[in-house]
Image (tube, helix red, strand yellow):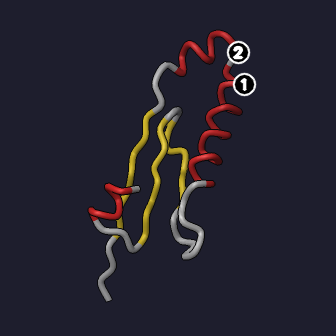
Amino acid sequence: RQRQLSAIMLDVDNTAALNQQWGTRIGNVILNSLGTMINGVLRKNRGVDFTVRFTGQRYVVVLADTGPRGANSA
């Protein structure tokens, strides 16, 4: 069966200033927490939507069984 899949890419800006002020260890803790927060607002009834930290300050949100309209509203 064919199923739709959508992905959202997020890029957090100005993380260099965060790392300069607090250090990269704290910067990573903050960025990991942000990923957890993004994952917390995803749909839980199907259990297939998820967030991954792609590289550095970039995230990918995968929305299974979601077409363009659903992804746009997400």
Q: Are marks 1 and 2 in contact (CB under 8 Å)?
A: yes
Relative vertical location of residue 50 with respect to residue 13 in this rendering, above or below: below
Instruction: Place residue 68 in its image quadrant.
Output: bottom left
Q: Give the residue displayed 70% in from the left and 15% down from the top.
A: 22
How crowded pointer 2 is (Cα within 10 Å; few <14, some 14-19, many 20+) is rated as few
Say left or right for 1 vs 13.
left
Q: Is residue 47 above or below residue 52?
A: below
Q: Report helix, strand or loop for mark 1.
A: helix
Residue 26 got which mark? 1
Residue 32: where, in percent of width, then height? 65, 40
Number of other residues with Cα within 10 Å of mark 1, as a class: few under 14, some 14 to 19, many 20 or more: few
Of residues 31 and 68, the one nearer the viewer is: 68
Numbered mark located on residue 22 in the image: 2
Left or right: where 56 falls relative to 71: right
Q: Identify the element where label 2 is drawn.
A: helix
The alpha-carbon separation of the residues under discs 1 and 2 comes to 6 Å
